[in-house]
Amino acid sequence: MSVLPSLITVLALILYFVTIVNVGRARAKYQIQPPQMTGNPNFECAVRVQQNTLEQLIIFLPAFWLFCLYVSPLWGAGVGALWVVGRALYAWGYYQAPEKRAPGFAIGSLSMMILLLGSLVGIILKLLDSGLF
């Protein structure tokens, strides 16, 4: 298998790590003491970016690897890279103003759907080819 899926996985994890760091930076900048999760809209945006990225990551990683395994590692890496770019745009937009997150969210969601549906089709085709169905 190509090393590209591994590279995309590392890039996705780095992106998530950056969102964690940004929450810590915002917490210090706006003097939000733990365990507080509210108090400044900019801090709350940083927390939402981090939380939403985590929510998406748990779906992305299995869908991505299943797509790479059952469809194509090269195409999977391309769609996975698109997801990483979409999530980065989502974060950048959300940090500026919540209403600016939509383009990145759309790119990330579209690439996620491609990975999920592609995985499903690839698995079904493999099952049919194996004679189990």
Image: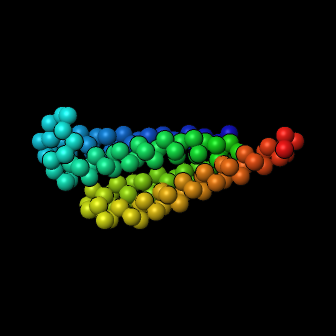
Residue 24 spot, x, y in % from top left: 23, 39
Q: Quadrant of the N terminus?
A: top right
Residue 19 spot, x, y in % from top left: 33, 45
User: In the depicted view, which residue is nearer to us: 64 or 41?
Assistant: 41
Q: Is residue 28 visible?
A: no
- Which residue does the image show at 66% across and 49% down from the upper left? 119
Q: Quadrant of residue 99?
A: bottom left
Task: Tell me if 14 is positioned left or right of 73 in this view.
Answer: left
- Which residue does the image show at 59% across and 45% down from the upper left? 63
Task: Tell me if 20 is positioned left or right of 122 in this view.
Answer: left
Query: Total label count?
Result: 0
Q: Is residue 127 visible?
A: yes
Residue 94 spot, x, y in % from top left: 31, 58
Q: Quadrant of residue 25?
A: top left
Residue 15 spot, x, y in % from top left: 40, 45
- Which residue does the image show at 38% across and 48% down from the upper left? 52
User: In the depicted view, which residue is nearer to us: 40 or 95?
Assistant: 40
In the picture as drawn, the residue positioned furthest to the top comes out as 34
Task: Tell me if 5 is positioned left or right of 51 in this view.
Answer: right
Q: Quadrant of the C terminus?
A: top right
Q: Is residue 63 above or below residue 104?
A: above
In the picture as drawn, the residue positioned furthest to the right comes out as 131
Q: Quadrant of residue 18?
A: top left
